[in-house]
Amino acid sequence: MQPVPPEGIEGNQPSTPAPPKRSGKKILLIVVISVLGFLIIAGVATGIFAWRFNNGWRSIVIENVDLARIPHGVYEGEAKNFHDSAKVRVTVQDHRIAAIEILKNSPSGNNDEMEQLAERIIASQSPDVDVISGSSASSKVLLKAVDNALVDAQS
């Protein structure tokens, strides 16, 4: 019987099998499946974002405000929706909307368009006017901010 050298000495190492090699086709298949999975998840997330955004601003309701019940004064109102927000100061004189100052506007809203919208509100004496095409969500939020100021003043 021959002596067995202690473990760790060369020549008596157990042989470990080499890891199996993946073929190029398998690697390509894994990459394609991963990219498709990412695209599906990104598409679903984008769809949820768009759905929340569209449903949010479309569900904003403008109240029927009776200006005859609103005393002379300056009133502030705010409105928020998803990523749009607005804050306004509404001046009422002789039961009429005399001025609207936009204190805060959404980053997505065009300031000139929002000023035009405020002028339309004053001309019609109601926040129940058409939104600006292309700025529908930020327009609706601005209208609601004016509406909130008037509704609070009416109470």
Image (cartoon, grey):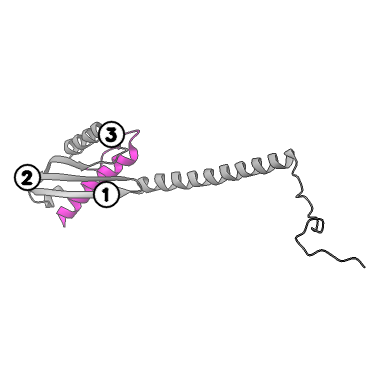
Using the image, tell me which numbered label, if any, was put on residue 79. Answer: 1
Left or right relative to 55: residue 151: left
Check the picture and name the quadrant holding the N terminus. Answer: bottom right
Label 1 Cα neighbours within 10 Å, binned few <14 / some 14-19 / many ≥20? many
Direction right: furthest residue:
1
The residue at the point 12 percent across, 51 percent down is 70
Give the image quarter of residue 58. Answer: top left
Whether residues under marks 3 and 1 lie with C-beta atoms below 8 angstroms apart, the answer is no
For the residues marked 2 and 3, what is the alpha-carbon distance in whole angstroms?
Answer: 31 Å
Q: Secondary structure at mark 1?
A: strand
**Position of the C terminus by quadrant:** bottom left
**How far apart are the alpha carbons under marks 1 and 2?**
25 Å
Q: Amino acid at mark 3?
A: Asn
Q: Is residue 91 visible?
A: yes
Residue identified by numbered label 2: 94
Q: Amino acid at mark 1?
A: Ala
Span of residues in magenta: 127-155
